[in-house]
Image (cartoon, rainbow, N blue to C red):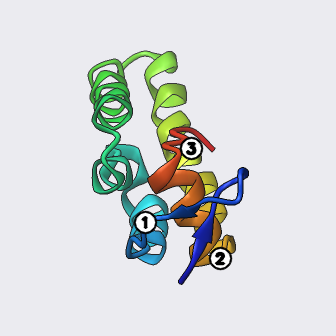
Amino acid sequence: MQVIDENGNSVPNESSKRVVAGILAILLGQFGIHKFILGYTKEGMLLLGLTFLSYLLMCLIIGAFLLFVPIIIGVIEGIIYLTKTDEEFVYMYQTNKKSWF
């Protein structure tokens, strides 16, 4: 797998984490596991914190709404990850570190 950046330079060959990150995003996206797999610690902690905050506020209506936000983010990101090719995924999410969508 040869990855070329926008300047035509060869990017070091990395193994793609696309399938693992995509499946984990769909199944466990609310916990940010897919973010930790890709090395995005701050974003993973944000999703995890939002999930725990929503569980704490579950007695209020806003808690139920907040619970769906990280789930929806995980499903959307999982679908995006799985629809990209390995080269696109490595370039976009592992090399250039695009953290959201």
Viewer-proximal residue, 51 or 85?
A: 85
Cα distance, mark 1 to mark 2? 17 Å
Residue closest to the far bottom? 1
Q: Quadrant of residue 30?
A: top left
Q: Quadrant of residue 65?
A: top right
| Residue topped by disc 3 | 73
Residue at 35 percent across and 33 percent down: it is 51
Rendered view: 52 above or below 2: above
Q: Which comes before the other along the chain, label 1 or label 2?
A: 1
| Residue topped by disc 1 | 12
Q: Tell me the crowding category of disc 2: few under 14, some 14 to 19, or many 20 or more residues within 10 angstroms, Cα based.
A: few
Type of amino acid under label 2: Thr
Type of amino acid under label 1: Pro
Give the mark toward the camera: 1 or 2.
1
Q: Which mark is residue 85?
A: 2
Cα distance, mark 3 to mark 1? 29 Å
Rendered view: 8 above or below 55: below
